[in-house]
Image (cartoon, rainbow, N blue to C red):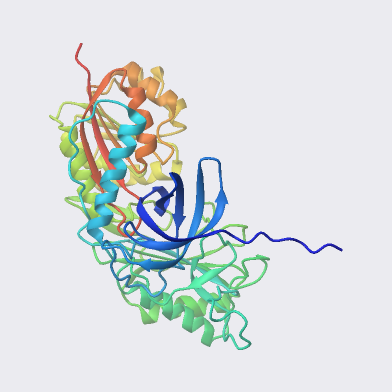
Amino acid sequence: MNARKYKIPQVLEQISILDFAAEAKCIAKVNDEVIFVQGTVAPGDIADLRILKSKKKFKQAQAINIQALSPFRTEAPCDHFGVCGGCKWQHVSYEAQLAFKQRQVKDNLERIAKVKLPEFQPILGSDEAYYYRNKLEFTFSSARWLTNEEIGKEDLGSMNALGFHVPGRFDKILPVDHCYLQPDPSNAIRNGVRDFAEANGISFYELKNQKEGALRNLIIRNASSGEWMVVVQFAYATEEEISLVMNYLQSNFPMISSLNYVVNQKGNDTFHDLEVIFFHGKPFIEEQMEDLRFQIGPKSFFQTNAKQALRLYQLVREYADLQGDELVYDLYTGTGTIALFLAKYAAKVVGLEYVEMAVEDAKMNAIHNNIDTASFFAGDMKKLLTEEFIALHGKPQVVITDPPRAGMDEDVVRQILQVRPEKIVYVSCNPATQARDLAWLDEAYVVDVVHPVDMFPQTHHVENIVRLRLRKN
């Protein structure tokens, strides 16, 4: 039998890293050939590159040895950096992160939109570069990720883990001791539950066969009000095991104001179609933004960086420049946070959203805040925003749109062009699809404001606000 031949990967030595690229990668060039580099590198580094894939127009590579360090570098504080995929830019100074995000928005809008653009506003950085998230989800696993040092060892200790999925591996969980994304007592709650379960012999979920294990998932949420919510997902747990874990949390973490659990034996961790069992405290926490209070339940969506979201909404309000007599449509309204934030500055706000549960949250929060000038409707956006809907609810003078990463559906853009509101304020989490939509809207609109906002420090993600005004004939 012929021995199988393995091709030795090509290694390029001492290559200069030139710039950041999309999706947290970097760019290098060798003989005018573009190489997209993954790994913990930064512009200005000199590194050895192991070629992973060769395409006609570019190569993909892994940085395997950094020979010289970039001036943009800083010391990553997290012990899990480089393995955990959550904060891929901890090794880059925050000033450099902001500069790249600003340039990323500019490059996308100029290269893809190809429309006339104003001078960009400086990116709005986050006051908190760490501990800014108000929601984290951790996974229990009976088969933890092994470090390079552990591979081949006989005595590995406990194989249980409570932490994050290793990038690209659905079945391997990286145990997390300290996460820099959510403030205390998030780390204490997670580590406490893990240690309590270990000490009491409560089994962790088997991710591969999905037929064993008591503990499956842990969700920790907090609000600026100081309230904390915990949701524990159990899989194949006894009533005694559920009682042990929930009583431990209630007794040891009195700051938890909403304690809940779910029994989930499905093939995935989503629980929107499952009953959430309220155990202690109250069934929601509250987030305050100016004079508005938003109730957040176990199934509610809310911006995960609430402090920066408030500043984003304030900019949206500023650029909407409402005079008090306008009808505003808020497309992709989610739980209606922007719509409710604008409601007292307009005659009426109409929110449209395809997720029914989010619309129910929006309606509840409108009632909770005594707002009767906002109405919300659920449905597929391109089917909901029709001539009949507009005839019934009125022609908007202002449109706010905050679509998902895929951007607006072309039918939605077409309907906006037909209605022709005076102003559009377009919030995007993906400047590339936003740029595509701006090219479509160029038929009738001119861009007069571009303002990037950093919602997620230590990552490559960036939000961008664009205001468009109806072009004068």
Asked whether residue 87 appears in the rendered view, the answer is: no
The location of residue 324, given as percent across then percent down, is: 14, 30
Identify the residue at image location x=56%, y=55%. 52
Say which of 90 and 156 sits in front: 90
130 lies left or right of 87: left
Question: Which residue ends up furthest to the left in the rendered image?
Answer: 323
Identify the residue at image location x=77%, y=62%. 4
Question: Which residue ends up furthest to the top in the rendered image?
Answer: 473
Q: Is 115 situated above or below 158?
A: above
The location of residue 17, given as percent across then percent down, is: 37, 56
Identify the residue at image location x=28%, y=41%. 464
The location of residue 177, given as percent across then percent down, is: 41, 77
The image quarter containing residue 295 is bottom left
Say which of 371 and 93 sits in front: 93
Say which of 191 and 200 sits in front: 191
The location of residue 423, given as percent across then percent down, is: 22, 26
Asked whether residue 230 appears in the rendered view, the answer is: yes
The image quarter containing residue 115 is top left
282 lies left or right of 406: left
Say which of 163 and 197 sits in front: 163
Q: Is 281 situated above or below 249?
A: above
Q: Quadrant of the N terminus?
A: bottom right
Q: Is 142 situated above or below 196?
A: above
